[in-house]
Amino acid sequence: MKTRTPLFINIAVTIGLTVLAFEMFAHESAYFSSPFFWGLMVITIILLFIMNAIGDLIENENFRKLSDEEKAIFLKDKNTPYFQKLWNSAFKKQSATEEKDILIDHGFDGITELDNSLPKWWIGLFYFGCIFCVVYLTAFAFTDYAHPEAELTHDTKIMLASIEEYEKNAPQITLENAKYSADNIAEGQELFKTNCVTCHGDGAKGGIGPNLTDTHWINHKEKSLFKNVFWMLENGSPNNPTMRPFIKEGTITGRDAEKIAAYIYHINQETAPITPAQGGAAPQGDEIKWENGND
Ligand code: HEC
């Protein structure tokens, strides 16, 4: 009769496998704090205790049927610590008679070979590999597990939701409180490329919309250049609907407008204008001397 694997080993293996399964299938990585996870753990451990108790009963029953000699061997085996047994089994050698039973004789070449049974750790690893393979393939085929695009979409959704939450609570930027900051120029340039370049051309040299790098302006609603650009983005052009009220129609936020206006201020006041000779559009409107350019 064989001795059984001790309870604590079964518990450790089961906990390991359960954590592995949660790692693979749980959508939220915070499963450690979920009551479902801990409930499952407690139930599993209780079941293992029950199974162990049933195992004890069966073992006692079988033990009674053994001969005295078999009983002595079984008790000796049972009293050896589990890891000691594992260690011993790794170095176990057959006796000469046992060897005879598992000898394969090649006959003609005189080479003899022992038909040893495979080591337990090897078989364990093999079965674990087979089971893991099936679980992995099933998970891959029917869930989002191990799909990088799905993970990216999931994380992007969370990120966008947190940005939206921030936008909702952060104070809105309006014409009154918008402020110029040189830190916004680079981001403003990117926003200009996505929203404005189709009409105002590369570097705002002009196209369907006027050249924004020169001294001439059709619309001058505010005293400062920075605020004037913001005003245009909020209200659009009163004379020409092609220049739309981007903020009011919801295409860009006040925060975006503050950045774009900083960029336009920068290319208009802090860099040389793109003249018609350099491919810029001819000046339109009146020549304006802005008061406090970026105020
Ligand atoms: C669909 C084309 C179009 C797009 C896109 C567009 N604009 Fe315009 N924009 C115009 C036109 C046309 C005018 C001239 C309006 C007028 O005649 O009053 C103009 C005028 C302006 C003016 C005032 C210029 C002046 O001389 O009075 C500013 C500032 C401006 N746009 C900024 C922007 C910014 C910043 C964006 C991107 C968020 C943008 N525009 C996107 C077509 C466009």
Image (cartoon, rainbow, N blue to C red):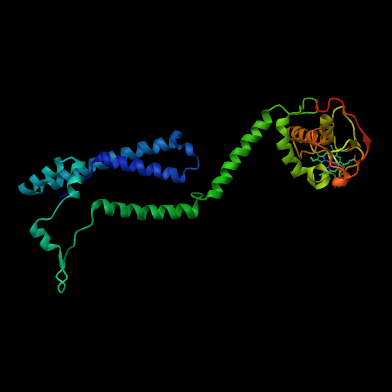
Determine the residue located farthest toward the left in the rendered image: 68
Q: Relative to 93, is 50 above or below?
A: above
Q: Relative to 272, is 223 above or below?
A: above
126 displayed left or right of 288: left
> In which of the image's four quarters is ligand 1 placed?
top right
- Give residue 185's position: percent from left, percent from top: 73, 35
Closest to the observer, 191 or 92: 191
User: Residue visible at 73% across and 32% down?
Assistant: 255
Q: Could you say which quadrant of the image residue 211 lies in?
A: top right
For the C terminus, the image quarter is top right
User: Residue visible at 12% across and 55% down?
Assistant: 94
- Give residue 107's position: percent from left, percent from top: 14, 72
Determine the residue located farthest toward the right in the rendered image: 286
Residue 58 visible in the current orientation: no
User: Residue visible at 62% across and 37% down?
Assistant: 161
Q: Could you say which quadrant of the image residue 294 lies in?
A: top right
44 displayed left or right of 102: right
Q: Could you say which quadrant of the image residue 84 lies in?
A: top left
- Give residue 239's position: percent from left, percent from top: 92, 39
- Give residue 52's position: percent from left, percent from top: 24, 41
How many numbered discs, if any?
Answer: 0
120 displayed left or right of 254: left
Residue 238 visible in the current orientation: yes
